[in-house]
Image (cartoon, rainbow, N blue to C red):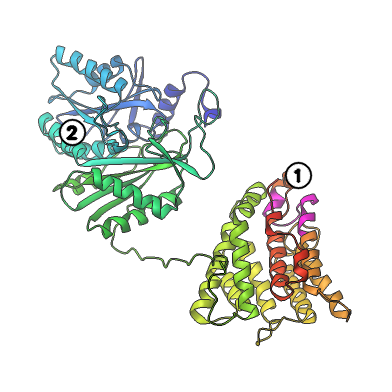
Amino acid sequence: MSYFLPETHPVLTAARGLALAHSGMIEVHSSPLYLRTRDPHPDRVVALVSGGGSGHEPLHTGLLGRGGLDAVCPGEIFASPHNRQIYEASAAAARSGGVLLIIKNYTGDVINFQIAAERLRHDGIPVATVLVDDDLATDSVDSATGRRGTAATVVVEKLLGAAADRGATLEELADLGRRIVAASRSIAVAARAQTSPTTAGPAFTLDEGTLDYGVGIHGERGTRTIARPGIGDLVRRMTDDLLDALPEGPSEVLALVNGLGATTELELNAIGVLLNDELIARGLRPVLIVPGTYTAALDMAGFSLTLTRLDEGWAELWTAPTRTPLVLPRPTLTAEGLERSPQEPAAPAASTGDTAPASAPSGDRALLDRYAQTVTQVRDNLTKLDQLVGDGDFGDNLAGGVRRAVKLADERGLDGTAALAEAFLNDVGGTSGPLFGLLFQHLASASPADGRAPSAAALAQAAEAGFAAIHRVGGASPGDCTLVDALAPAAQSLAASARDEAAEAPLTEAAQAAIRGALATASLRPRRGRASYVGDHALGVPDPGALAVALLFMALADIHEPTTATRLPAPGYITVP
C-alpha cells in the first residue's frame, strides 16, 4: 500500500483523484482541505458533515452526495481533521435548518468536531452532533472514553442521508442518528496488520495460526489474541458477542460485513452467508446482509461485523437512492433464495488403535483412507509450495477432492480409486484437479474387485495409460516440471518390475522412483503449468503436483507392501524451502 502513495500531500492528491473520477459531483477545497458535493438534494434543509482520519476509504468520501453527506473533512492518515477544516466545511455547506455533525468516537475527532460546533454556534448557525460509538471491544466500565466509533458510521450516514433528502429537521435527524447508534454494535478481527506508511512494514506482527480479536480501524491491536478458529466458528463467536452487547429491540436486523482493506469480496460474501445462518438460528430476521469494504484500516487483512436492529422505516432509508461515489445500496444477500451448501466431511483421522472396524476395509478403500490421511497431514505445506510457484490453491483443491471422494465412498459404496476418479473429474476445479481425475480413472481399472493388491503389470499399464491421457490433454512431458515428472518414473519402475519375476517390492520401488522424480523438479525450470509463468523464481521449489503423485504411490506401497514400505520417508519430507 504505502509504496504507491505520493511523497507529498497524499491525502489532498487522493481527494483530487476522487473528484476527477466523479466529474461534476465533487469539489475539493484545498486550504483547509474538505470536499463538498456539487449537487445537494434540493429538499434538504439540514447539511450533513462528517470526516475523520484517512485510510478508511470509502468511508465518508464514498458517501458524499445525494442520499449521503454534504461535506467531508479528511485528516491525515489515521489522524483527526483539524477543527478549522470542519468549521469551514460546515459553514460552506450549511442549509437553512443548520448542520448536523456525525462524529466517530475517537478523542481527536470528538475534540475537533466539538470545537467546530462551538464556532458554528457562535456564528449563529444551528448545529447538532451525533456521536457514533459502536465498537463493543472497547465497551468497558473502566474507560472514560467509551466505545470507539467504527463501521456503524456507514449505517448512520446512509440512513441520515436518506432522511435529510426527505426534508427532516435538525432535531429529527439528531434524534434518528442517536437511535441508530444505540441500536448498533460492531466487532472486528484481523489476521494481518496494515502496512505502516512510515516503515512500509506491518504495523504489528501476529504468530502463525493466530488472529487479533477486537481490533480498531486505526490498526490498534485487538483486545486479545486467539488461536485462529475455522471461519464458521469465528463468525459464530462474533455473532454471540454482538448479540450479547446489542440492546433489546426488533428482531429485524441489518448486518454489515465489512472488509478492513485486504479482505476479498469472495471472503466477505461467504461470511455474509454464514452470518445470515447464525442470525436466523437465533430467531432474528436479517432483512439486509451487506458485504463489502466500507470502513477500511488501510490494507489490514480482517473484517468487522456490524448489527443494527431496524426500527420501522429504516430498511427503506437504507435502500433509498443515492448519487455518491460509493454506489449504495450495494447488492445484498437476504434470507430469501439462499440455498444451503452441504458440508463436506472432515478427512478421516488417523486410527488411535482403541477400536477396530466391524470389517477390515478392502485394499482399495484402505488406499483412499490412507491417502486422505496423508494429504491432510501435508496440505499446508503443499499450499505454501504452490504459493511460491503458482496461485496457492493446490493444497486446498487436493484436500477438498479427497474429502469429496471419502464422502462418495461412504454414501454410495464406491471403491476408493473409483471415488477419487469421480470426485476429481466432476468436482475439483483448477488445472491439476481434472488431470488427477484422469490418473485415478485409469488406476481404478487396475484394482482387483476382491481387494487384493493390484499386480505390477496392471498398475504399470494403468499408470502408463494415465500418463498418456494427461500428456494428450495438457501436453506435459518429463522434464517440464509437472506431476508427470513423478508419474512417468513410477510407471517405468512398475513396467520394469512386471518384466522381472524376481521383483519383491514393485510398489515400494515405484514409490521411490516417484519421490526421486518429484524432488528433482526443484532443479527444473518449469515449461508447463502455472509455474512456467514465474520462470527462474520456481527454481529450488519442488512441484506440488509431482509430490502429490509421489504420496499416492507411497500410500499404495504402505497398504500393499507394509514391510518394505518402511524404507520410504515419512510424508514430512515435504518441506517448504
Q: How many marks?
A: 2
Magenta-drawn segment = 518-533
The extreme front residue here reads 354
Question: Along the line of sight, which residue is nearer the eye, 575 or 33?
Answer: 575
Question: Can the viewer see residue 270 in this picture?
Answer: no
Q: What amino acid is found at the position of numbered circle 1 in the picture?
A: Asp
Label 2 sits on a secondary structure element that is loop
> Which tag, 1 or 2, sits closer to the chain's start?
2
On screen, residue 189 above or below 31:
below
- Which residue is painted at 79% across and 71% down in the image? 491
Among the 4 quarters of the image, the one containing residue 440: bottom right
User: Disc number at residue 536?
Assistant: 1
Which numbered tag is attached to residue 419? none
Residue 130: within the magenta? no
Q: Position of residue 428 (x, y in %)?
A: 56, 66
Which residue is at 30% across, 31% downward? 148
In the rendered image, which residue does mark 2 sit on?
Answer: 42
What is the x, y in percent for residue 30? 37, 17
Residue type indicated by callout 2: Pro
Say above or below: 406 vs 485: below
Q: Residue at x 56, y 58 (%)?
A: 396
Residue 185 percent location from the top left of the image: 26, 41
On the image, which quarter does residue 483 sit in? bottom right
* Magenta region, main secondary structure: helix
Relative to residue 537, is residue 160 drawn left or right?
left
Q: Residue at x 62, y 69 (%)?
A: 370
- How far apart marks 1 and 2 lie (CA) works out to 62 Å
